[in-house]
Image (cartoon, rainbow, N blue to C red):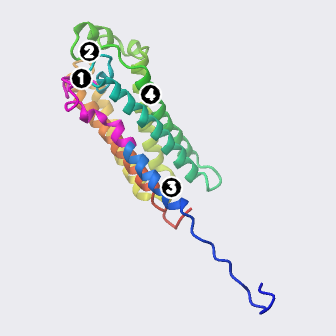
Amino acid sequence: MDLTTGSTTRQVRRPSARGPARAVGYAVAGLLAGVCYSSFVLARPLGSRLSLTESYVSELEVAGQPASTFFRLTDLVAALLVVVLAMALMGRLARERPAEMRATVGCLCLAGLGLAAAADALVPMSCTPSTSEACRREVDDVAIIAQLHQGHTLSSVLGVFAAQVAMLLLSVSPRVRRRWPALARASLACGLAVVVLGLAEVSLMSSQHRLGAIERLHVLLISAWLATLGWWLSRPPRGGPD
């Protein structure tokens, strides 16, 4: 209240610069996460001679392969950014009470994808089964349960499973569907596609034929979804800003 005139003085709040900066940060984090997660596209320019259709993406990180350190580092960067995106999304969704279980578990699974990617980089494959018969017998020509006792195989399987669950749970979360309906639709499409590709991988495990091509497709899908997630996090939700 203005005491001299008796009129009410309205206090004008200056818009904070943190909002736009944070939005740009989300978009950049999503884009970089997607780019780093699919860094295998640089394999040929960096000197790799592994088959694009028969080799595992993880073979690029085997010690002695061209630019193996680069591929492990990009996995670690992607892992960090995925965890950041998961925590950011959880924070945005948690502003509404009560907590929504599907959204919360979806965010935790997204963080699990990041942790699995970090494990992939820190515990790389020891050999390249696509080029070594001895390695193939050790890594691939064993029962699935035995394969899951291998650290790298276990982290890779858990990472893909976490990504699938994250996509599908976020696609059916009422809170995500209300705030970012396009993100929910994209999550559903990518989640179903990754599930189908995962089943195709399992069916090809005995022959190994074209297994690398299928794996690269699902990695690209996850990468595209991460970039999409960052973009929609940078946008105000339906109904206005948080």
Q: Is residue 201 above or below residue 12?
A: above
Element assignment for label 4: helix
From this viewpoint, which residue is outermost toward the bottom? 5
Q: Kindly identify which residue carries mark 2.
A: 129
Q: In x, y percent, where is residue 188? A: 39, 48
Q: Kindly identify which residue carries mark 4.
A: 158
Q: Nearer the viewer, residue 79 or 215?
A: 79
Q: Is residue 59 magenta?
A: no
Element assignment for label 3: helix
> Residue 55 — which label?
1
Q: In x, y percent, where is residue 158? A: 44, 28
Relative side of 153 to 94, left or right: left
Which amino acid type is shown beneath numbered disc 1?
Ser
> At x 26% / y 15%, what residue is drawn?
129
Relative side of 238 to 95, left or right: left
Q: Is residue 47 magenta?
A: yes
Q: Are marks 3 and 4 in contact (CB under 8 Å)?
A: no
Which quarter of the picture shows residue 133?
A: top left
Q: Nearer the viewer, mark 3 or mark 2?
A: 3
Q: Are marks 4 and 2 in contact (CB under 8 Å)?
A: no
Instruction: Tell me the quadrant of the picture where the C terminus can be found.
Output: bottom right
Q: Is residue 188 visible?
A: no
Q: CA distance from mark 1 to mark 4?
A: 20 Å
> At x 47% / y 49%, what residue is drawn?
172
Q: Nearer the viewer, mark 3 or mark 4?
A: 3
Q: Which residues are magenta?
A: 33-56
Element assignment for label 1: loop
Which amino acid type is shown beneath numbered disc 4?
Leu
- Report the magenta stretch's main SS: loop
From this viewpoint, which residue is outermost toward the top? 134
Q: Are marks 1 and 2 in contact (CB under 8 Å)?
A: yes
